[in-house]
Amino acid sequence: MQNSDAVWEIVERKRTAFFELSDRIWDIPEINYLEHQSAEEHARMLESEGFRVERGIAGLPTAVMGEAGEGGPVIAILGEFDALPGLSQEAGIAEQRPLVDGGNGHGCGHNMLGAGSMLAAAAVKDFLAKSGLKGRVRYYGCPAEEGGSSKGFMVRAGVFDDVDIAISWHPAAFAGVNNPISLACNEINFHFSGRASHASATPHLGRSALDAVELMNVGVNYMREHMPSTARIHYAITDAGGGAPNVVQARATVRYLVRARTLPELLSLVARVKKVAEGAALMTETTVRSEIVSGDANLVGNTPLEECMFAHLQRLGPPVFDDADRATARKFQQTFNAEDIAASYGRFALKPKEGQALCDEIFPLNAGDGTLVGSTDVGTVSWVVPTVQMRGATYAIGTPGHSWQLVAQGKLPAAHKGTEHAAKVMASTAADLICNPRLIEAAKADHRARLERTPFVNPIPDDVEPPLPEKADA
């Protein structure tokens, strides 16, 4: 803890260059495994900071890693830089105004996430050099978090095998240590094949793959009463077999996203969904082939790391926003409804404050019951490395995730201030760990105890290749 001020001062000296990096990534929103410009921007920034840089790690063209320091423990700080489709939006404007119709946008704040994580890593690098301490800090630039599960493929490739601790963050409405609850998931294509025929003259000769898809969807919908209440199942028909109603569709594909609170629950639920698909094929005399596209494990918590990070957050305090920041945030709040704002507070078990536009507090440890959560590929890392995350306050309270409003706030001064705040907490947490090996040992003991009865199974099977654009078939 005594090293916090020194690391925070380094963050303050470096922040402007990393705010500019965040803004450059915002300007070039790229989606899953297409983040070539973004990855190169991150690689060049790492090189300019004096990191030893590797591009294309784990066989992923847009994954990058920078390392600094020698010997000692290895602290990994995880970053991301992928955007979302269909969320193009002009910056700083509190009305929906796409820059490019149908274009991409940083609707999850990953432009800030990557820049803030690298800023923290750069500060730790300089801290190590100045103090002469043994230790290595690594920045992992991870592509395709939004459904591409790159960290799962990176885990499978062994790039975290020698890492002692992993640290990350995510932009949010409030600041605090992330409650480590997420849903394990698998994204699966179900390809049905039937027999084409004239839908009127010879309908009895046709076997409809689209009928099979529709029957599968009905069957899965009937499952919903008989699965854990925290589980989620979503689907989208990605190939309906053609647009001609007078042709019996010989092919059809439906993509399922199956989520569950734990890995064992996920594996069981996926097996049941596959049985429904087989039943639909049997009923329609078609055939079905399933293909796992991606998968994330649920987050594994770590009490020593969470308490350590929380102590740094309490000492630093919440981000310091000014009246101009709050005035801008209120303009965005006018585009939300009351339910949006209530949900922001509810997620972190906070009591709503009338007229509050931006975060002015640190939410408590283990805040929120985890009933409304998504999935993250950081979860897969947390099964193989003791991991801790924070939430950094970077946008107006009530901002929906994956929205044009979040995109619009991604370059505002409040976003920069929240990014700096998160970088300080991550950097001082990492420095504290390097200076106190007993903290690392306590974190590892906690990690071993949590996995003692539930061995890790990567939700991405060994024979599944990353869904790189040149390899994608659906």
Image (cartoon, helix red, strand yellow):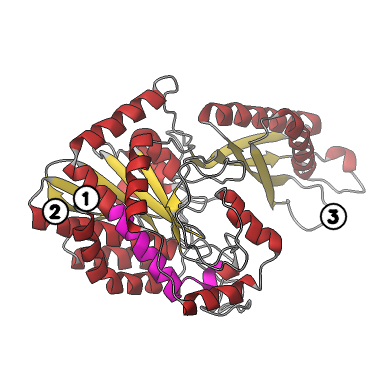
- Front in this rendered view, residue 217 or 68: 68
- Element type at marker 3? loop
Mark 1 Cα-neighbour bin, 10 Å: few <14, some 14–19, many ≥20: many
* Lower position in the chain sequence, tag 2 or tag 3: 2
Main SS, magenta region, reads helix
Magenta residues?
Answer: 406-427
Q: CA distance from mark 2 to mark 1?
A: 9 Å
Residue, disc 2: 128
* Lower position in the chain sequence, tag 2 or tag 1: 2
- Element type at marker 1? strand
Which residue corresponds to the image point at 60% horizontal and 53% vertical from the top-left? 351
Residue, disc 3: 245
Residue, disc 1: 137
In reply to whether residue 411 is colored magenta, the answer given is yes
The amino acid marked with disc number 1 is Val
Which residue corresponds to the image point at 59% horizontal and 69% vertical from the top-left? 404
